[in-house]
């Protein structure tokens, strides 16, 4: 294995560890609320990424092409973050995260209908395996004892995440980093009215949490996008499966969350299904 590949693999793993602190911060930021954190995630994300473009003199693709589609793209991005943060606030971290990380399965489905890509046998097997894992996680006990709206929010967030990834492939005039900047900037006005539902309580701790959520998201995307293209996409996808494990690990250490045995088995089964999906 080449040294360049090793450094790229480590970069993806580090990115996964960094982003895994987002649900932990959302849990610690209950006094701010998931609605407000969603706003700060996009607004501060756009701000920090704008500073990144200026400081490192990176090229920002101008907002000239596919404007209507870009507005839809940004709006969906904001909805995903809002639903995901809401799910985290209502469910154990491990369940909220796995519902979001079902997006590789949704990518196959949306790629078929939007991009006209055929669903391979391996991809179909991955979808069926993931579905079995979902059934285990959403067992009657877990479902009834948890928040039904939380489960619904997490599931829709995962579905929309698959959609947004497929839509991102249709933008030919924007590089990935520019696309991330514009989607965060455009998402912010859609989330702004949420501040009036539950105005945030500002303190030093809350400010640090809100800022960290924005910074973490941008660092993650910069690390991931800079690594893609250096190694095989399937290899990157396999490493990103660890993104499901890290949040559960930190939730156990920091929040004392102990997942049910059915949840653990369901997560493992979904990871197997996702493995088939990313290697189709």
Image: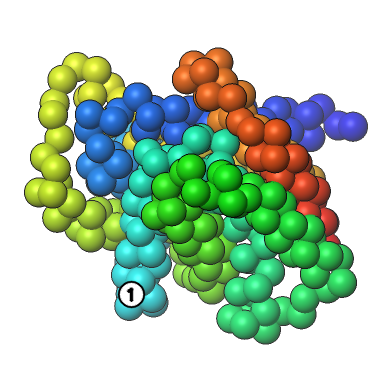
Residue 229 visible? The answer is no
To which residue does mark 1 refer?
Answer: 67
Q: Quadrant of the N terminus?
A: top right
Res. 76 image quadrant: bottom left
Q: Is 13 situated left or right of 171 in this image? A: right
Residue 148, horizontal then vertical, whole percent: 43, 53
Q: Is 238 situated left or right of 71 in this image? A: right
Residue 136, horizontal then vertical, whole percent: 69, 50
Residue 122, horizontal then vertical, whole percent: 86, 66
Q: Residue at x 9, y 49 (%)?
A: 196
Q: Residue at x 62, y 65 (%)?
A: 106
Regarding mark 1 in the picture, which secondary structure is present there?
helix
Q: Residue at x 65, y 73 (%)?
A: 109
Query: Of residues 150 and 83, which is closer to you in this image?
Result: 150
Res. 69 image quadrant: bottom left
Residue 264, horizontal then vertical, whole percent: 70, 36
Q: Is 47 situated left or right of 196 in this image? A: right
């Amino acid at each position: 294995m080449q040294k360049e590949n090793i450094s790229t693999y480590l970069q993806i793993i580090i990115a996964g560890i960094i982003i895994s602190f987002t649900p932990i911060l959302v849990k610690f930021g209950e006094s701010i609320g998931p609605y407000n954190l969603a706003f700060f995630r996009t607004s501060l994300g756009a701000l920090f990424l704008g500073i990144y473009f200026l400081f490192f003199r990176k090229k920002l693709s101008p907002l000239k092409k596919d404007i209507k589609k870009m507005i839809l793209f940004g709006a969906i991005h904001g909805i995903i973050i809002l639903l995901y943060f809401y799910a985290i606030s209502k469910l154990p971290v491990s369940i909220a995260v796995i519902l979001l990380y079902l997006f590789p399965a949704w990518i196959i489905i949306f790629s078929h209908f939007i991009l006209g890509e055929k669903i391979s046998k391996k991809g179909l097997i991955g979808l069926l395996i993931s579905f079995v894992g979902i059934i285990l996680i959403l067992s009657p006990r877990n479902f009834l004892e948890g928040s039904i709206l939380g489960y619904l929010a997490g599931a829709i967030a995962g579905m929309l995440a698959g959609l947004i990834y497929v839509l991102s492939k249709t933008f030919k005039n924007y590089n990935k980093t520019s696309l991330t900047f514009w989607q965060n900037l455009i998402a912010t006005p859609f989330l702004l009215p949420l501040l009036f539902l539950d105005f945030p309580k500002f303190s030093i701790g809350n400010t640090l949490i809100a800022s960290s959520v924005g910074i973490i998201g941008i660092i993650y995307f910069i690390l991931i996008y800079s690594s893609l293209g250096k190694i095989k996409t399937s290899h990157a996808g396999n490493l990103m499966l660890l993104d499901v494990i890290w949040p559960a690990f930190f939730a156990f250490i920091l929040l004392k969350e102990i997942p049910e045995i059915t949840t653990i088995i369901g997560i493992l089964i979904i990871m197997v299904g996702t493995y088939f999906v990313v290697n189709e």
